[in-house]
Structure formats: structure tokens, C-alpha cells
Image (cartoon, grey):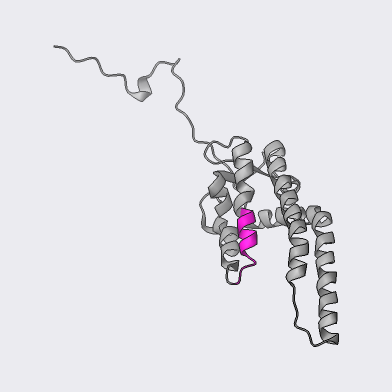
Amino acid sequence: MNAPPLPPPPDQLPVWAPPPPTVPTFRYASFWIRVGAYLIDTLVLLPLTLPLLVAIGNRISGELDGLLQTNRPLDLTPIYRHYFGWGLLVAAGVYAYQVLMVRYFGGTLGKLAVGIRVRIAGTGAVAGWREALLRPVLQMIVGVASFVPGARLITLLDDLWMVWDKQSQTLHDKVANTIVIHAR
């Protein structure tokens, strides 16, 4: 019984054979350029968040003035109840901004301004709905957790993870399987 013939070595393949697949290479966005993009996004979102922060600050200031004029204990519970809904509305607005910008434009206005884009890790394909919806989820959770005493470490860990990661991914990039690269 004869064994089937072995295929020719790779250097003797016919000319019509397709080339071997290449691994895409990317220039990953560094920590500082992403900080710059974040600062631009903060300025973009300021008109949405500033009125709420001013209103809460004025209300707390009024409570503190009342506290100083009387001997009653400071109770911020009504303030928390009153502005909790507004806070959720602002958080939903920020979430929607991030999701829609990443899905339709490949990045937020800050990322677009500094020339970086969000892509799917491994392939470099444009982020789809899955990636766009997942990326800000961890950021929102981390943002809420940062108000819990001692939980600021989570925020710091998420932001600094990209410093030692070989693809410069943050934890929220890992959750969504995304990378942030320089636009070509």
C-alpha cells in the first residue's frame, strides 16, 4: 500500500498559491494621548454635567449655611434623593455619548481630535454595537465605585492598566475586547 505523496515544501509552492496570512500591526495609543482625549471629552460634556454640579453645590451650600445658623445636625439625605434622578440622567447621557460615538465614528470627539480610534482587538475591525455598549459599562461601574471610600484604587487600576499592557489596553478595553490605536 502506497502512502499519499507529501505536499511540496513552502518555498516550492506554485506561484498561484495565496500568501500566508499576515498578523496586523497597530500603533497603540499611549497613556498620555488618551489622557488628552479624555480632557477634550470632559470639556465637551461639561455643558451637560456643570448645571447639575452647580445645583448640587448651591443646595449643599444652603444646607451648610442653615447648619451654621442653627444647632441642627446636617442631613444631606433630601439632597441625595432630589438629585439622584438627575445624576442618573447625566450618567445615561454620558453613556449614550460614548456608545454612539464609538459605534458610528470609531471614537469620542476627544479621540477623534487627537487622532486615535477604538477598534476590535486582534483584527483591528471597526467596533460594533457589542464593543460600543460594553466599553463604557466598566467605566460607569468604576466611576460609581470611586465614590465608595477606598474604591478609588479600582479607578486608578483601570486607567493605569494600559501602562504595562502590551496592547495598551485598559480594563474596560479588555472587557469589550477593544484596542485604541492611532488612525492611519
> Quick check: 15 left or right of 35?
left
Q: What residue do we see at 40% from left, 15% from top?
A: 14
Considering depth in this image, is 45 or 31 the residue closer to the camera?
Answer: 45
Residue 119 visible from this viewpoint: no
Residue 91 in sight from this viewpoint:
yes
Q: What residue is at 81 percent from the left and 79 percent from the top?
A: 64
The answer to whether 158 is drawn above or below residue 102 in the figure is: below
Residue closest to the far bottom: 71
Q: Tell me if residue 145 is in the magenta stretch.
A: yes
Q: Is residue 155 left or right of residue 122?
A: right
Residue 161 drawn at (x, y percent): 55, 58
Magenta stretch, residue numbers: 139-149
Q: Nearer the viewer, residue 141 or 88?
A: 88
Residue 38 in percent (x, y) is at 71, 55
**Which quadrant of the figure contains the N terminus?**
top left
Which residue does the image show at 57% across and 44% down from the upper left? 178
- Observer-nearest residue: 58 or 115? 58
The image quadrant of residue 132 is top right
Please tell me whether residue 90 is drawn above or below residue 58 in the rendered image: above
Q: Check residue 25 for magenta coloring.
A: no
- Return the residue found at the far left: 1
Question: Which residue reaches farthest top?
Answer: 1
> Which residue is rendered at x = 58% and y = 60% of the image?
160
| Residue 143 in which image quadrant | bottom right
Per the picture, the main secondary structure of the magenta-coloured stretch is: helix
Residue 74 vs 34, above or below: the answer is below
Give the quadrant of the C terminus. Answer: top right
Question: Compared to 92, does 152 lie above or below?
Answer: below
